[in-house]
Amino acid sequence: MAIVNSIFTWYMKKRVHQIELFIKYPHDVQEEWFHKLISSGAYTEWGQKYDYRSILTPQQFKERVPIQNYDTLKPYIERMLKGEQNILWPSEIKWFAKSSGTTSDRSKFIPVSEESLQECHFKGGKDMLSIFCNNRPDNQILTGKGLVLGGSHQINQLNEDSFYGDLSAVLIKNLPVWAEYYRTPNISIALMDNYEEKMEKMAEATIKENVTNIAGVPTWTIVLAKKVLEMTGKKHLLEVWPNLELYIHGAVNFKPYKEQFKELIPCNNMYYLETYNASEGFFGIQDEANSDEMLLMLDYGIYYEFLPLEHIEDEHPRTLSLDEVQLNKNYAIIISTNGGLWRYMIGDTVQFTSLSPYRIKITGRTKHFINAFGEEVIIDNAEQAICKACTETNAVFKDYTACPIYFKGEEVGGHEWIIEFDQQPNNFERFVDVLDQTLREVNSDYDAKRFKDLALRRPKVHIAPANTFYNWLKSKGKLGGQHKVPRLANDRQYVEEILMFL
């Protein structure tokens, strides 16, 4: 196995040179992909509608094709689900990644082409390992197995030619045979729908394996880890899996979970690697061990545009190409892909932390913010505040959500938080003060509204009993890796529902 590991590491390092190429020539690579995509889509129904054959520049593309979202593409995708082809993309589409993104009842079915599987998602998986092998040349991950927390939806058949499931389920079903050998547990467990039973079965199936790496959403990884420790009677995961050296995570901000992972895996040499992989595409990989920024992956069959957040409500918003973006500004991501998504707004917001190379951090969702009073609080603000409040009061939080308290009579507005802790603050009032003060420091609009309680009063914070959010998600049939607690909302729906569980 050690020989295989060495050969694999050598092979992966070769890819690092290709990554260095797009780092050196980012605009050339993006322009090349733009022309490839337009050329590929020219004879599809969509391409003919917008006359792709006469589009020669990104500017013409932006002027001619409106920005899309799932609702605008839905009529086309519904026809594809029934088996129609050459609608948005020329090659056969028979796989669809079912995505909710939030706890919304509405499911999205994102088309997954063979090109997006191979050139985007699988390439991203290989690059993730290439970067890890390059940064940790003495690794031994292939001497054991990878524990993968797969999706909560198995593959379902729509008709004889179409299948759908969570992205992770679609990827697992399409993995080459050799890759299956290196992962655990087997597919029948990895793709179970019932998450409570699944955690039990996963723990049972993996306890005796030589697990060298884990991939999964932090919240569910912690649930599984606690189940494993409960079954084995061990104090931490290294007593169960002594060769564990890599944890791959994504989907939510990892910073709030870091202390819990240090307790679960008490090893200074543990490697944490963040990825930005969504149903719509694989966008970013943390390429430096000592930084939580992610390298924007530019050669995966995706052409990027960036929409400044302040213009998101404009009737005809002007998007920026990669060479026009600025540091530390919030942008909504617009993508055109080799899966047939055209000028598609994925709903995430990012900031660029570096322009050479292009590195990003996810700052939130285009719909997940609080702006009831002009305060424009985004998830990145909220998580900086909650992390600092935890640090100052020796607390460890597990989940949270927040929403506005609207003006009522003579009362000014405010924000209402529900927070579930693994370890409660040693001084609750101090926690609330630090939360509030940090929001004021990181968000000038919030600070202005808080001045002398002018438009916003001190936050109202509820401590939720253990498993409150878990029970809420369960009541909605939303347990599973892709279902996440909505951190911020501009209305009171989620908070009102969760208050019923307190």
Image (cartoon, grey):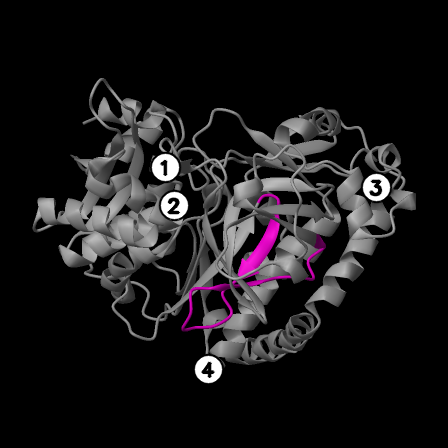
Element type at mark 2: helix
Q: Position of residue 173 (x, y in %)?
A: 61, 45
* 162 sits to left or right of 222: right
**Front disc: 1 or 3:** 1
| Range drawn in magenta | 279-302
Q: Name the main secondary structure of what is drawn in magenta.
A: loop
Q: Which mark is residue 488?
A: 1
**Residue drawn at the location 70% of the way across and 50% of the way down:** 116
Q: Position of residue 479 (x, y in %)?
A: 38, 34
Tell which of 122 and 365 is nearer to you.
365
What whole-number distance in Å separates the C-alpha atoms at marks 2 and 4?
37 Å
Give residue 97's quadrant in the image.
top right
Task: Specify the amino acid type for callout 3.
Answer: Pro
Q: Which residue is mark 3?
A: 90
Dot 2 and dot 1 residues touching (CB under 8 Å): yes
**Front disc: 3 or 4:** 3
Q: Which residue is mark 2?
A: 379
Label 4 neighbourhood size at 10 Å, few (<14), some (14-19), many (20+)? few
What whole-number distance in Å separates the C-alpha atoms at marks 2 and 1?
7 Å
